[in-house]
Image (tube, coloured by chain):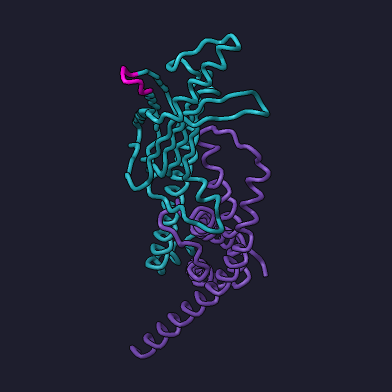
Amino acid sequence: MKVNRDDIIKMIVIALLGSTPIAFMTFDFMFPNMSTPSLEKNMMAVLAISTLVGLPCGYLSSRTDMAMMTVILYTAIGYAFAVVLYSAPYLTHHIALILPGFYYAMFFRFTILLLFLYILGGFVGTVLGQWIRDSIGREETSLTWKDK
Amino acid sequence: MTEAMAARIKKHWVFVTLYVLLSLFFLVAATESALTYSSVVNAQEQVALGRTTHSEDVLPNGTLLISFSMEVVNPSRFDINVDSVSWYVKVYNGTEPHRYGMQIAVDYIGSTEGREIASTSTDTLYFTAHVTDSNILSSLNEFINYSASKGIVYTLATVPFVHEFDMIGHLAEFERNYLRERYLNDLVKIDLMHSSEGAGA
């Protein structure tokens, strides 16, 4: 199937909007004592929010392949944003980072498994979003026919 | 954006609005959290020990009076809750590796005192000890006599006392009782040490 300009714009907009919860959850997983509000490393909460973030992909996109690509895209952007948040003290206060290799290795080691949860939750959300859209569509159709 | 997209957004405006609000909520939360983290790391850099003063006097009744004060400079936006403060006065005899430290005085402030160093302030901690223990005083006199035999003249007030100071606290009310993620405890922990020997005082 061809991908048109509208599909790409929609994918980028949804990906940008969906990236902020991913970034927050990743950061919160590293520093639960400093983030506001905190999920306290509750994986069920992470999965639930991932599902919620995935909903619009299915709801607003009629193409499943594009919706799934959007989930992967917002996860990637969100994770990159989380790395920026993780580096915040060294970006804003010019504090010298001792052992940068270890610092970032610790981040990836702690959070890499979350990516699977985000994508899994996103896919589940996509399916749910499509289901909600189809349900609303069916209801609208039935109401329209009833009126006539 | 094409007309088709605009029409689609118009049709699903409730859903789109909720999604934008959700995204904004997490954007604000993530930014706020990152700024807090940034300030905590910066506070770790900024909080430091300041000026120290100490004095040793012999009172008319023969008691040795030792006083010490230490400034704790907290320019950060977080209060420091003090968990413990230890102050030791020692006299070291001998040279490394055969070095013997004789404890002259000690004082301790625990967390139950609820001591707090307010944000953007400098607090001074004062300690005073009256050394009346005859064993300690006689040991000091032995040290003075031994030093005199080696050609170094000391009096009770001019003995090279070493003041060792250690303060452990934590920033604000951040959670710090993690069993596995110890880095979270260390991140908000303040541990400041000072030795007048190292400072050359």
* Residue B50: quadrant of the picture: top left
Q: Which chain is purple?
A: A
Where does the image place residue B196, in percent across and percent down from the top left? 50, 23
Q: Residue shown at 40%/88% (left/top)?
A: A142
Q: Is residue A56 visible?
A: yes
Q: Is residue A6 left or right of residue B170?
A: right
* Depth check, front residue: B54 or A140: B54
Q: Residue shown at 55%/76% (left/top)?
A: A127
What predominant SS class does the magenta segment belong to? loop
| In the depicted structure, whether residue B33 falls above or below residue B3 | above
Residue B63 inside the magenta-drawn segment: yes
Where does the image place residue A120, in percent across and percent down from the top left? 59, 71
* Depth check, front residue: B21 or B16: B21
Where does the image place residue A62, in percent across and percent down from the top left? 55, 73
Residue B157 inside the magenta-drawn segment: no
Tint of chain B? cyan
| In the depicted structure, whether residue A114 falls above or below residue B122 | below
Q: Is residue B122 visible?
A: no
| In the depicted structure, whether residue B82 falls above or below residue B94 | below
* Depth check, front residue: B48 or B119: B48
Q: Is residue B135 left or right of residue B101?
A: left
**Residues in magenta?**
B59-64
Q: Residue shown at 47%/44% (left/top)?
A: B189
